[in-house]
Image (tube, helix red, strand yellow):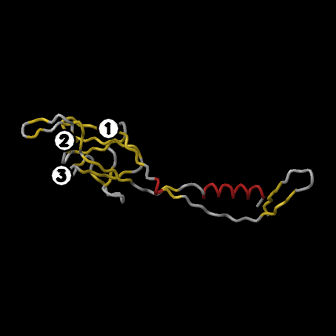
Amino acid sequence: MHKSTLLTSLFTLGLLLFTPLAIEGRERVSGWCEQGGNKTTTGGLTSTESVQQSFPSCTVTIYDVGTLDLASIFADDSGTVKSNPFTASATGFWFWYANDARYDVRLSGGGIVTPFTIGDILLDDTKNDVTTIVSVASSATPTFDASLGTIFTNTLTAN
């Protein structure tokens, strides 16, 4: 094999081997059906302070960010499909898994008078990215030029 072809092949192989390999990983998102700015009534009296109100069993709908397209969501990291929309628990807790992307979460029902959206949730499960590093050995003969009055150079020539 010609020297330049060998070096080009080794360079190309090196680029391929150092390319990160993405492994399918899903990230979990969780939250509560709740909203601030609400008044409570106790003993017929309405509070003067706003409180965080919970909405048990609200409806949770996941969209691809900025659209009304229902997102593909999962019940676990293994990829068990979860219905969309779905109902939060009796305590108002909700969760879902999805592939890396941006999502909007719409909360409605369960006593929520005006549905609202938690927007632009970024999922970026980079902990599952894997970089493979491989060492490639080759044979080369070094040539040194350290003669007086020159700049030191080191050249490798493939054998």
- In this rendering, position of residue 133 left or right of residue 38: right
- In this rendering, position of residue 59 left or right of residue 102: left
Q: Which residue is mark 2?
A: 109
Q: Which residue is mark 3?
A: 90
Which of the pair 37/127 is nearer the observer? Answer: 37
The mark that comes first in sequence, 3 or 2, is 3
Q: Which residue is mark 1?
A: 68
Residue at the left extreme?
Answer: 44
Q: Quadrant of residue 120?
A: top left
* Neighbour tally class for label 3: few under 14, some 14-19, many 20 plus, Cα within 10 Å: few
Residue at image coords 16%, 41%: 111
> Which residue type does callout 1 highlight?
Leu
> Which residue type does callout 2 highlight?
Gly
The mark that comes first in sequence, 1 or 3, is 1
Q: Position of residue 159 (x, y in %)?
A: 79, 64
* Neighbour tally class for label 1: few under 14, some 14-19, many 20 plus, Cα within 10 Å: few
* Neighbour tally class for label 2: few under 14, some 14-19, many 20 plus, Cα within 10 Å: some
Q: CA distance from mark 1 to mark 3?
A: 26 Å
Q: Quadrant of the N terminus?
A: bottom right
Which of the pair 97/50 is nearer the observer? Answer: 50
Q: Position of residue 115 (x, y in %)?
A: 23, 37
Residue at image coords 30%, 56%: 75
Residue at the right extreme?
Answer: 148
Q: Are marks 3 and 2 in contact (CB under 8 Å)?
A: no
Residue at image coords 24%, 45%: 33
Total numbered labels placed on residues in the image: 3
Considering only vertical position in the picture, is 39 above or below 159? above
> Which residue type does callout 3 highlight?
Ala
